Image: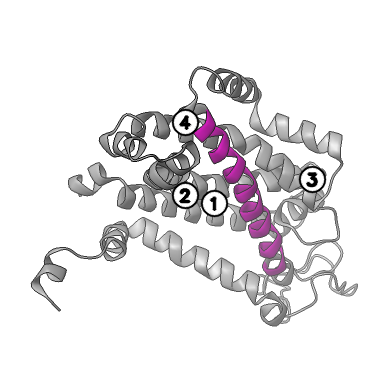
Amino acid sequence: MTSAALAYPSPLREFWQAFVRNKGALGGLAFLLLVVACALLAPWLAPHDPSQQFRDALLTPPVWLEGGQWRFLLGTDELGRDLLSRLIHGARLSLLIGLASVVLALLPGVLLGLLAGFSPRRLGPPIMRAMDVMLALPALLLAVAIVAILGPGLLNTVIAIAIVSLPAYVRLTRAAVLGEVERDYVTAARLAGSGPLRLMFVSVLPNCLAPLIVQASLSFSAAILDAAALGFLGLGVQPPTPEWGSMLASARDYIERAWWVVTLPGLTILLTVLAINLMGDGLRDALDPKLKDVQ
């Protein structure tokens, strides 16, 4: 290895070194990888079918409590379904909703933000006024209204959460673009004959990716929370499909008799969202050069 390579590490290596300094972010990444592995391997990891009902084991407590059974490590719900199996399979839908809604919000949000930033007098005002109207409404209330119009279900839940998340990407992209368009490299690209599309997607957009990546990671956790909230209200994924929010909704009547049917799905949502937020903080620290200098 040459001395120049030692003096100037690759950007990926430098990013990873900055990321691992944040122990909370590293722990969040490890937990998220565990959840993703459970979601991908759910058919093989889950001890039972998530919809199978054991009528002789209704509301069986977890194995560490009196009356627990080893075949149901985390107990069963009000219909005798294994909670551990439903939590593992529920991770698939919760992560799918989060990922799909982030992608559906990120792509049009970046495009609208680029248009608003490159055309601040013509396209910028109407785009930003529309985003201001959306931001004036509480996010969950807007999502509930959209799902109430479209109807409950997985696809409509993803669409509603994506629409709610859209303004953040538009505003963030526009702000980043306005900070970049006056720089020398953009002026040089214009003088070299670059057209508007090349300026947007080749010259400017790569330099705006760092805050967008952080926003996407934080929106991922918000999407999981919104999906759980819609499921709790009966507007998200419909039973008997295992999803963390719908599991909370079906178990709320048994919170005093069988605390585990409410606590365990809620704790799973809490830990997953916390892990994603910690990872988002680590990404922000690693991608922001000012914060890297402080560290």
Q: Is residue 97 magenta?
A: yes
Evaluate if marks 2 and 4 touch, with contact meaning CB atoms under 8 Å apart: no
Query: Gap between marks 2 and 1, in whole Å?
Result: 6 Å
User: Which marked residue is nearer to the observer: mark 4 or mark 1?
Assistant: 4
Q: Mark 4: few, some, or many residues within 10 Å (few <14, many ≥20)?
A: many
Direction from residue 285 to residue 221 in the image, left or right: right
Evaluate if marks 2 and 1 touch, with contact meaning CB atoms under 8 Å apart: yes
> x, y (%) of residue 262?
70, 54
Hey, which quadrant is residue 22 in on the image? bottom left
Direction from residue 263 to residue 217 in the image, left or right: left
User: Which marked residue is nearer to the observer: mark 3 or mark 2?
Assistant: 3
Label 3 sits on residue: 156
Residues rendered magenta in the picture:
88-115
**Which of the marked residues, 4 or 1, is nearer the chain's N terminus?**
4
- The colour scheme used here is one colour
Mark seen at residue 277: 2
Evaluate if marks 4 and 1 touch, with contact meaning CB atoms under 8 Å apart: no
Amino acid type of the residue tagged 1 in the rendering: Val
User: Which marked residue is nearer to the observer: mark 2 or mark 4?
Assistant: 4
Hey, which quadrant is residue 167 in on the image? top right
Q: Residue at x 82, y 61 (%)?
A: 241
Label 1 sits on residue: 273
Q: Can residue 254 be seen in this snapshot? A: no
Hey, which quadrant is residue 48 in on the image? bottom right
User: Which marked residue is nearer to the observer: mark 1 or mark 3?
Assistant: 3
Evaluate if marks 3 and 2 touch, with contact meaning CB atoms under 8 Å apart: no
Q: Mark 1: few, some, or many residues within 10 Å (few <14, many ≥20)?
A: many
Q: Residue furthest right?
A: 55
Label 4 sits on residue: 174
Amino acid type of the residue tagged 4 in the rendering: Arg
